[in-house]
């Protein structure tokens, strides 16, 4: 049995997080249904972590709360099956919305828009998020 082991880099993440928190700029015009690169960080336990130097991961804007924040769900390209995941196509590639990792996100964490979902796919994801919360 091979156990995947890695060392979480909380020190590096704290340095990046501090820069993100200190960076005050005009919020980008993000909208519901868009997928953005987002610095979600180095997280604890089963929480999803970002990757790379800036701890980023694609995140879908599910609900815009105001010009400064939104409810988002991270996305992975790894094949995931189950009630905690929803399959979508992004630029003809299979991706999976990680419904169980829904969270509130500040605009300073997002960097670059990647894609906008079509309305049918976006409504499907919103329904799946509501079903998760309702326990359906």
Image (cartoon, rainbow, N blue to C red):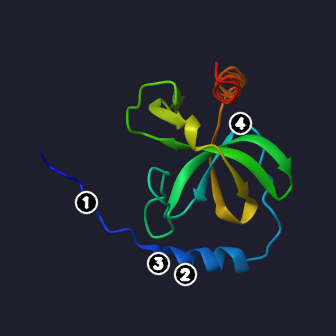
Asked whether disc 2 touches disc 3, contact meaning CB atoms under 8 Å apart, the reply is: yes
Residue 125 % position (x, y): 65, 27
Label located before the other in sequence (2 or 1) = 1
Find residue 15 and report its image quarter: bottom right
Q: Nearer the viewer, mark 2 or mark 4?
A: 2
Q: Secondary structure at mark 1?
A: loop
> Where, quadrant-wise, is the C terminus in this rendering?
top right
Q: Secondary structure at mark 4?
A: loop
Residue at 81% of width from left, 63% of height from top? 27
Q: What is the number of the mark on residue 5?
A: 1
Q: Nearer the viewer, mark 1 or mark 4?
A: 1
Q: What is the number of the mark on residue 47?
A: none
Label located before the other in sequence (2 or 4) = 2
Most distant residue in the right direction: 66
How far apart are labels 1 and 3 at the CA level? 18 Å
Q: Secondary structure at mark 2?
A: helix
Residue occupied by mark 3: 12
Label located before the other in sequence (1 or 4) = 1
Residue occupied by mark 2: 15
Q: Nearer the viewer, mark 2 or mark 1?
A: 1
> Where, quadrant-wise, is the N terminus in this rendering?
top left
Q: Residues within 10 Å of mark 3 (few under 14, many from 20)?
A: some
Q: Nearer the viewer, residue 112 or 131?
A: 131
* Total number of numbered discs in the rendering: 4
* Left or right side of 114 for 62: right
Asked whether disc 1 touches disc 3, contact meaning CB atoms under 8 Å apart, the reply is: no
Label located before the other in sequence (3 or 4) = 3
């Amino acid at each position: 049995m091979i156990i995947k082991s890695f060392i979480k880099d909380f020190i590096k993440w704290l340095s990046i997080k501090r820069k993100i928190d200190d960076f005050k700029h005009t919020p980008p015009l993000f909208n519901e249904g868009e997928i953005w690169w987002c610095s979600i960080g180095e997280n604890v336990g089963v929480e999803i972590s970002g990757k790379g130097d800036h701890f980023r991961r694609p995140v879908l804007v599910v609900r815009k709360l105001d010009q400064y924040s939104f409810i988002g769900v991270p996305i992975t390209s790894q094949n995931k099956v189950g009630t905690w995941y929803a399959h979508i196509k992004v630029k003809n590639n299979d991706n999976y919305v990680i419904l169980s990792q829904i969270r509130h996100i500040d605009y300073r964490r997002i960097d670059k828009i990647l894609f906008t979902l079509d309305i049918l796919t976006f409504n499907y994801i919103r329904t799946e998020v509501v079903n998760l919360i309702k326990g359906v």
